[in-house]
Amino acid sequence: MLWNDIFVSGTGRYLPPRASATDLVGDGTIDRQALEMSDFESFTASDGFTAAEMAASAATDALRRSGHEGADIATVIHAAFDDQEHYAPACYVQRVVGASRALAVEAGAGSCGGAAGLVLAASHLAADPSATSALVTAAGRFVAPRWPRWLPGLGHFLSDGAAAAVLSRGAGRARLVATSCTAVPELEDLATPTIPAEDGSRMMTRAETVGVLPHVGTLQTAARTAVEQVLQEAGVSLDKVSRFAVTGLGLAQLTVLLFEPLGIPSDRTSWQLHRTLGHVGPCDQLLGLDHFLRQSLEPSDTVLVIGIGAGFRFICALLEITE
């Protein structure tokens, strides 16, 4: 879908302290070969802040960088996953930033919650002529014993943190050019928690226990379709994309799903950021976008956001740097 007069005017983040990935090798949580394949060097672990508190901090950062105030926000869309500490996190963010007149809603979409939030926020701005700006937040906090840091079946760390973006009309750091989405709903059963964890803390999914290797071809096709669709609609070729904001799934997984099939050089992606953070739940795409927007990108440079989420779904967003 092509968008008109929708901009990302500011982004923000909250990242708790990093812990060394090799520490988990020493205590037997992860074997060294698996860590080397993932290429992670550290992960973020909250020192007490809840997911909602981290989201509010990221939102405050994004608003400051956007030049907007909470009162300007027409909708607050908060992407969360299994938040056991707050049942209305969007409203918490709404209160902290002072967006009392906004529509505040929680969004899911698994690991591509941040990308989904961009689409939902843009849709609200496009549908409501009176709305001038929207706030997207994403946050994740994975607390033991319910969630272990390392998921061996999927090959990545579960990390804590938050990210945010303010979308607005008229002007901004980057223009939202186009979005696309594809899905493989026949694989939704891989995300159904039906297998008891050994410690009884929760139910696990088939994706966690057996992985997704038998379905790699199907997932590659869905990812390629989403990327090709957004680029075709925007009239941009893959080799002209300046940066790629991806999901922090681990280098081996990203190489198989995205980098090799699509011919994406890893040094033009946000992987160098994610390898120091781990997989921060629904936040990865917004963290990657924030990372790039803080760099010295030039007007007309482009950033392609590629979200991958359980279920399975792929959400892409192409942005053009404008200032």
Image: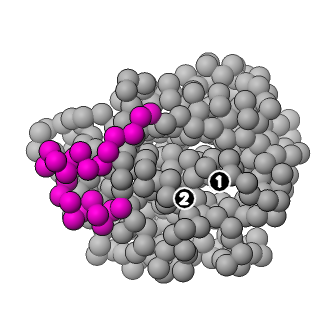
Q: Position of residue 244 (x, y in %)?
A: 60, 64
Mark 1: few/some/many CA within 10 Å (<14, 14-19, 20+): some
**Left or right side of 308 for 304:** right
- Give the Cα separation between the discs numbered 1 and 2: 8 Å
Amino acid marked by disc 1: Phe
User: Which is nearer the eye, 271 or 159?
Assistant: 271
Question: Helix, strand or loop at disc 2?
Answer: loop
Q: Position of residue 305 (x, y in %)?
A: 61, 60
Vertical placement of residue 251 versus 19, above or below: below
Residue 57 visible at all? yes
Q: Is residue 175 magenta?
A: no
**Left or right side of 128 for 191:** left
Residue at far right of view: 170
**Left or right side of 249 for 164:** right
Q: Are marks 1 and 2 in contact (CB under 8 Å)?
A: yes
What residue do we see at 49% from left, 58% from top? 272
Residues drawn in magenta: 16-39
Which label number is shown at residue 32?
Answer: none
Which label number is shown at residue 292?
Answer: 1
